[in-house]
């Protein structure tokens, strides 16, 4: 299951400093529009359809929560930022930067302002060669041919010379060095969204908490005192089983794993919900299980204040969460922060995301990656 859309953009420039124009466009797209995860080689090709200087062309793969039309708006902004001037008559002219959406997931889009796959993709070497670099196994959803077959059958016989390769912006980040990152937070803080984005962007193994099928959860929100112990014991057993099963499949010294929870959350929630006697018994069982589990190389806690958490909870609309009180969320936050202050032997990073929208705002997402990147 993908939590983001994947698109491939074609970039070209034949005016001014062509390489710099491409680099600036890639940087603008990455910092303002979508996450640039892969960049092709740069290819030099002659102007096609008009008299002009030769182009530098490349392709990039981006991940985004935007729709195709929303991405198009961002692409147009990147062109405008790069000084793109369009002909009043619609004819081909030289340009500092040209950016086209050529692939959006495996979708076929036929709108007035956007056609995907690009209708002339198969007739343009300057699109096909960079496309082969970033997506060699991509199959055209209409022609049912992969990129190599499209190149073999194209009518374009123009020269297409490899020049050099630019690094992908994500190469400046290396969360993989932690091997195993656990992302935690209160209810509605966005931990699953962040874990999912990072796993896709950095090709990590994603481990998600399987909470949705817990039969005690809706009962607990109706009658906390009656179902608290059953709920917490059920969660503890599920989390222990899942971590044991999922992480045993990975080599934590070579695979990069991102999880949207850490089993210690069981202790934090149970301390809030259980009676003193129940908690003592629960803690004894937890300590036995905890000793057997691998520890994350980095534990990230996403802090949000209670009003913002309540907004997110209402927005995602889970029926059984709608009656969660501000006091309950405050107690959970205190539990996490008290744990973070007292825990030893765990690499902890607290990030305040109260005023950040890292799902819809690219700058906020990169800001979080920067915080992780600064952590030793």
Image (cartoon, helix red, strand yellow):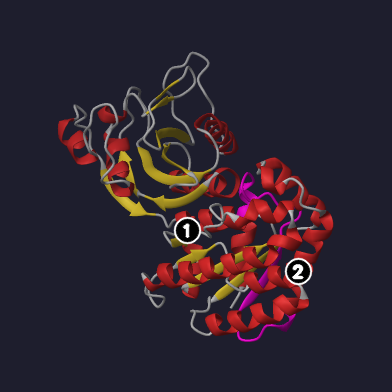
The residue positioned farthest toward the top in the image shown? 89
- Residue 374 shows up from this direction: yes
- Quarter occupied by residue 192: bottom right
How far from the left and from the top, in percent, is residue 5? 47, 41
How far from the left and from the top, in percent, is residue 311? 76, 46
Where is 235 relative to 87, above or below?
below
Tell me the SS state at disc 2.
Answer: helix
Report if residue 91 lies within the magenta region. no
Residue at (72% x, 61% y) in the render? 226
Tag 1 residue: 199
User: Which circle's residue, 2 or 1, is located before the other in the chain?
Assistant: 1
Q: Provide the residue span drawn in magenta.
A: 341-365
Foreground label between 2 and 1: 2
Tag 2 residue: 272
Position of 188 with respect to 145 (left or right) is: right
Residue at (68% x, 61% y) in the render? 227
Question: Which of the pair 136/245 is nearer the observer?
Answer: 245
How far from the left and from the top, in percent, is residue 136? 26, 46
Question: Which of the pair 20/182 is nearer the observer?
Answer: 182
């Amino acid at each position: 299951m993908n939590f983001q859309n994947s698109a491939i953009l074609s970039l070209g420039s034949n005016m001014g400093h062509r390489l710099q124009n491409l680099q600036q466009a890639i940087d603008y797209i990455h910092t303002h529009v979508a996450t640039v995860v892969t960049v092709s080689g740069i290819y030099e090709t002659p102007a096609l359809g008009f008299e002009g200087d030769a182009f530098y062309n490349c392709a990039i793969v981006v991940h985004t929560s935007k729709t195709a039309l929303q991405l198009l708006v961002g692409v147009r902004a990147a062109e405008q930022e790069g000084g793109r001037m369009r002909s009043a008559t619609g004819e081909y002219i030289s340009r500092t930067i040209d950016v086209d959406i050529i692939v959006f997931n495996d979708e076929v889009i036929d709108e007035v302002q956007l056609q995907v796959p690009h209708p002339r993709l198969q007739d343009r070497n300057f699109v096909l060669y960079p496309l082969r670099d970033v997506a060699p196994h991509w199959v055209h959803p209409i022609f049912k041919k992969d990129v190599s077959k499209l190149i073999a059958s194209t009518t374009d016989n123009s020269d297409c010379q490899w020049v050099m390769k630019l690094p992908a912006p994500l190469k400046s980040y290396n969360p993989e060095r932690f091997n195993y990152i656990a992302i935690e937070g209160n209810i509605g803080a966005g931990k699953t969204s962040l874990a999912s984005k990072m796993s896709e962007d950095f090709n990590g193994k994603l481990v998600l908490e399987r909470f949705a099928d817990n039969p005690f959860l809706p009962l607990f929100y109706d009658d906390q005192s009656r179902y608290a112990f059953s709920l917490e014991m059920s969660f503890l057993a599920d989390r222990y089983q899942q971590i044991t099963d999922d992480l045993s499949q990975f080599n934590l010294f070579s695979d990069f794993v991102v999880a949207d929870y850490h089993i210690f959350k069981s202790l934090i929630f149970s301390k809030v919900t259980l009676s003193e006697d129940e908690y003592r018994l629960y803690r004894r069982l937890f300590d036995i299980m905890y000793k057997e589990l691998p520890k994350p190389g980095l534990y990230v806690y996403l802090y949000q204040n209670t009003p913002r958490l309540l907004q997110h909870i209402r927005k995602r609309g889970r029926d059984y969460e709608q009656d969660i009180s501000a006091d309950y969320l405050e107690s959970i936050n205190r539990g996490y922060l008290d744990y973070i202050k007292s825990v030893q032997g765990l690499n902890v990073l607290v990030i305040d995301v109260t005023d950040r929208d890292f799902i819809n705002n690219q700058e906020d997402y990169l800001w979080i990656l920067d915080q992780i990147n600064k952590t030793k």
